Amino acid sequence: MKKITLLFFLLNFTVIFAQKEIKGKVSDANGLPLIGVNVVEKGTSNATQSDIDGSYKIKVQENATLVFSYVGFKSVEKSTSGNSSIEITLSESQLLEEVQVVGSRNSKRTVVNSAVPIDIIDVKSVTTQSGKLEINELLQYAAPSFNANKQSGSDGADHVDPATLRGMGPDQTLVLINGKRRHQSSLINLFGTRGRGNTGTDLNAIPASSIKRIEILRDGAAAQYGSDAIAGVINIVLNDNVDELTGMVTYGAFNTNADGNFPAGTANTGDNFLDTNADGNKTAKGRNFDGNSLKVAANYGAKIGEKGGFANFTAEYLNKEKTLRPGFDFRRGFGEASIESFNFFGNVAVPVSDKTEVYAFGGRNFRDTDAFAFTRNNPSPRIVTSIYPNGFTPRITSNIIDNSYAVGLRTETSSGWKVDISNTYGKNLFHYYIKGTLNASLEEASPTEFDAGGHTLSQNTINFDLSKNYASVMSGLNVAFGAEYRTEKFTIFAGEEASYATYDEDGMVVTDPTTQVIPTDPETGDPRPGGAQGFPGYSPANEVDRSRSNVSLYADGELDITDSFLISTALRYENYSDFGSTLNGKLATRIKASKNVNLRGSISTGFRAPSLAQIYYNLRFTNFSSSGASEILLSPNNSPVTQAFGIGKLNEEKAINGSLGFTANFGNFTATVDGYMVNVQDRIVLTGYFDASSLGIGVDSAQFFVNGVDTKTTGLDVVLSWRKKYGDNSFGASLIGNINDMKIDAVNNGTLDEQTFFGEREKAFLLASAPDNKFSLNLNYARKWFDAGLAFTRFSEVKLLDYQMYEDVADYGTFQDQVKAATDTYGVKIVTDLTLGFKLSKTTKLSIGSNNLFNIYPDQQDDWVEAGGYWDAVQMGFGGAYYYARLGFQL
């Protein structure tokens, strides 16, 4: 036994003694350091990554071979025999062999030679060179046709930012994680938000620190990936690095010095700020900064086994306080919501043989959000003066919980077929809690907080995918087949009784208004309304529990007829249990015009099924404008009320997509330019307000989801980049831009009045989702321990129609004069971002900077705007300058 123990010790001692340390640096062809390059000892799971300045260090066995790999570059193998220091230069090919990339199921396809436009955003680089806190903010400035808005006074949309691609709706962009379908939010956007009447995927529920890169396919892809891909696909690829702990702490705040000419006494100016620490309409002293934000994040990966398995985990905490900006007396809480969130995400892969692995990923996001609703001022039957003597500004708070997971198995058969079987599940819970409010019909007995109920959306997707590459067919053929079975469930659950009910003078719920007496306001003499002010709770009558299923089959192929000529096709059949089936196709091609230039183009058909929320969502709410309050019924599509107004059953949206562009690569300079066209028929929108006062259902107006309009969108995406190194000095410049033109070809109002069905005001909100253009110029410099980034983003003019469109036309003369008076024009603005980075050691880096350095605001408007402040929610935002400091580390 002692001999065996001694032999074991000697063998291990020999192995340890035989190890040696290799150091070096990895850079690109221009001499610029590459961050996060995978350095692996071939045949083992021993690995590391290059750090901030491209340096790496790894202990390996004698005569080992190192493999250097990085997304977008050709992999390099290097023997360590006789070397203790190895400098590596990687050349670009953008070959993406490790993962499935959107736009192609061919593992040999590259971004440069693809037939469709694909952006690849290295999130690690973007987050270390920017003060943006959330994914939507990052993409707003990094992707040409991506637009997202911070909202105010839009109920749930204050808590989940609606985002669009190429001016389409939030629900017309499909989101994937590691190539698997991500569930959408249960929230449907209402009021004056972009994407009114749409649901969307909550990208901010995914921690930025968990993401390796984001791939954006800017092309119609319903034939490849199914419903929701009319505008394109966003694929989020999670971190898979091991033996490395990275993290950061970021702190920042907004400048409260809003740019504008505000009358004396304007809310949230001088010493007239709404007190965020007290309910009612109490004021607080003026402040120089608000929206104070703290973000703490950490990512760590560990090896599993000896065949390249890994487990990578991310934890992220964000605490952002409210911002307050100048508003009117009826909107004293104008500003962005506060957010406290905790994110946890994991990504795991375990090889079980040389050609088979089991994988899993997923996580949980919890957010506690708090936003102000419109103000209730005296005199009003909505105010109980013994509770709020000076009126009150209710707070709409929410708990948002996103849970998701995916498990699967990937393998390759002996005949070369790649097989992927997976199950993906996700659920979004949106639960409202209304605070600093009351139920006026309960008078002095009213609570000031209510559980208002909420909604959920869950989705389960089973995928079976096959693909194979035939290198001997012409210059290469890749074929893929697959099937998908998806189930969805949407629910609305009621809040507590006092959140939605109206009570009589005896404190009993009103069930018969003809026999029960509702309390009246002593000042106005008007009956007191029931329900929680700010956001009335969901009642049992609003409750929904609806499900559906979807079965789809697809086939696609890519054929390199020659090295210079590629053609790809896709065909997809889908059948929904609730509205029927659809068949869509796509054809794309790429031609190498020269060694450095590729031409590419595509044409496809697409569709999007109406969401369960669009079919079944319903609510009674109070709509506030400068002219007062009105009670609105948002009626579900299957309701007799909806049918009584002549609104038909919701059908699928149908689309035709086309694109044509080129890519160019000349040494230090690369360019992609792609024109596109997207025609959508029967686009689902939210109507205006129909008069419902004569129906006897206790509301003034009703509105509905309809296949309301046909739109045609044309545009151009441009991405230009240049990088060069002169000695120790590294320079980079990029220009990303989008030119977009959306037109409403038809309003499908039938015999209904067009201005009520989908009038000029609703048209303006839809068109504002597709601003005319956006351009960003990004300049970067680095030298040894210092780097700097300067970005200029130009936002185009946006026009919206305000609440004056609800006034009597006679007050303005003609309808055209009314439209002119109601038009709010937000002129062109340029926002400047600056960041300075200081490498304090090999493992730590300090960055300081500012988003919107010069405190630029949209053009000031009047008190008719949708949100009740001096600005609407336009693409550039209304928060002003944000200053931050960030300490990052890599161990």
Image (cartoon, grey):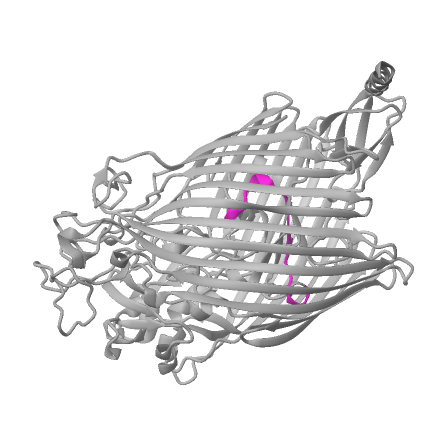
Q: Nearer the viewer, residue 241 or 71?
A: 241
Residue 567 vs residue 157: left or right? right
Magenta region, residue range: 204-224
Q: Position of residue 861 (x, y in %)?
A: 33, 55
Q: Nearer the viewer, residue 692 or 153?
A: 692
Q: Nearer the viewer, residue 798 or 374?
A: 374
Q: Is residue 360 above or below residue 825?
A: above
Q: Residue at x 84, y 35 (%)?
A: 43
Q: Position of residue 72 (x, y in %)?
A: 74, 44
Q: Residue at x 60, y 37 (%)?
A: 313
Q: Residue at x 35, y 66 (%)?
A: 542
Extreme-right residue of the structure: 472
Residue 251 can be seen in this image: yes
Tally the numbered discs: 0
Q: Which of the 4 image quadrants contains residue 254? A: top left
Residue 527 lies in the magenta-colored region = no
Extreme-left residue of the structure: 522
Q: Position of residue 794 (x, y in %)?
A: 51, 49
Which quadrant: the C terminus? top right
Residue 43 vs residue 118: left or right? right
